Amino acid sequence: MSTTLTDAPRTERAPGPRLLRGLSWLVVRQHRAMLLSLLALMVLGSIWIVYERGQMKDFLDAAGWPGKELAQPTFDSDGVGLVLTTLGGLPLILAVFVGAPLIAGDQEQGTAQLVTTQSVSRLRWVATKFAWIYAVVLVTSALLSALFTWWWKPYRSVFATPWSDGAVFDSTGPMLPALCLFMTAAGITIGVLARRVLMAMAVTFVFAGAAGVVFDRMIVHLAPTRMLTYPLDADMPSRLNESLEVDRWIGSADGHLYGWGLCSKTTEKASDACVKEHGIVNNVYKYLGFDQMPAMQWTGAGILLAGTVVLTALVLWRVSRRPL
């Protein structure tokens, strides 16, 4: 009896080897849309920054900069503003759309209870989620920050936004990765406590906005300020051109300081009389210099990373003690 093709025994194809196995495979598969979105953001954002830098370089080369002064001393375009706005909003986006729903979504849908009834402990499951999300957030934000720093640093003198502005300070060096990690950790923490996705996202949005205001005001406390005294009628020294003004006064020869507006009288004669009456001879300027920026950024990044560690430890401690 002959055997036809249809009578031949079927053999199932053995599955190929996986790069990921176990819990890591589960976490990546569950959050693949989110992870792929972050990777796409990294790639597209990198291309965008390189393109905008090339546009600026071409413009400045055509204008003969730096050998020739620009007719307009600062370069400002919609592209530059949009890049700064996007990088500035990245920590908020990560906090609200990545951090807040990460575990809150599992709690709301019952996935957390299903996963943790298997052979995997709650602590291990949440720790794996942290590891993958933090890794992708760190790689994405670090690359975008490095590229923007590469663009901004040699051309900072023609940027309309100074280094001390939060849009630049928070988007260069180690600040952007540290901010993104902290905001993501804050979103996760709020999500674990709120247990509902929409509530977690709303609370995280408010928290991120308030935290952004606090971070902007923190900048003057990240390094010791400097004082410079120069004659009252003299021009401001050139070394202060890139400085961040913290405060300023007018002072007498014996070192007594007065508020800047003390002798701002309505007439020049009244102002001169006030200056003579108080013996004012100096301007006194309190500032932070551009050369202090790296130390300030590393100090700020250290504070944010410490906050990230605290929030992460809080979540891990809570999930190890209570059911999700």
Image: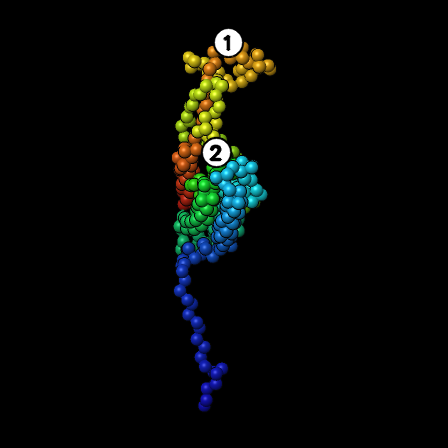
Residue pointed to by mark 1: 277
Q: Mark 2 or mark 1, which is nearer the start of the sequence?
A: 2
Q: Can you tell which mark lies on residue 52?
A: none
Q: What crowding class fits label 1: few (fewer than 14 Cα within 10 Å), some (14-19), or many (20 or more)? A: few
Q: Nearer the viewer, residue 40 or 72?
A: 72
Q: Which residue is most to the top?
A: 277
Query: Could you tell me how far apart the alpha carbons at marks 1 and 2 are, in whole angstroms?
Result: 37 Å
Q: Amino acid at mark 1?
A: Glu
Whether residue 191 appears in this view of the structure is no
Q: Against 27, is 99 above or below?
A: above
Q: Secondary structure at mark 2?
A: loop
Left or right: residue 297 compared with residue 49: left
Q: Nearer the viewer, residue 289 or 102?
A: 289
Q: Nearer the viewer, residue 131 or 236?
A: 236
> Which image quadrant is residue 146 in?
top left
Q: Residue at x 44, y 52 (%)?
A: 116
Q: Amino acid at mark 2?
A: Ser
Q: How many marks?
A: 2
> Which image quadrant is residue 254 in?
top left
Q: Position of residue 157 (x, y in %)?
A: 49, 37
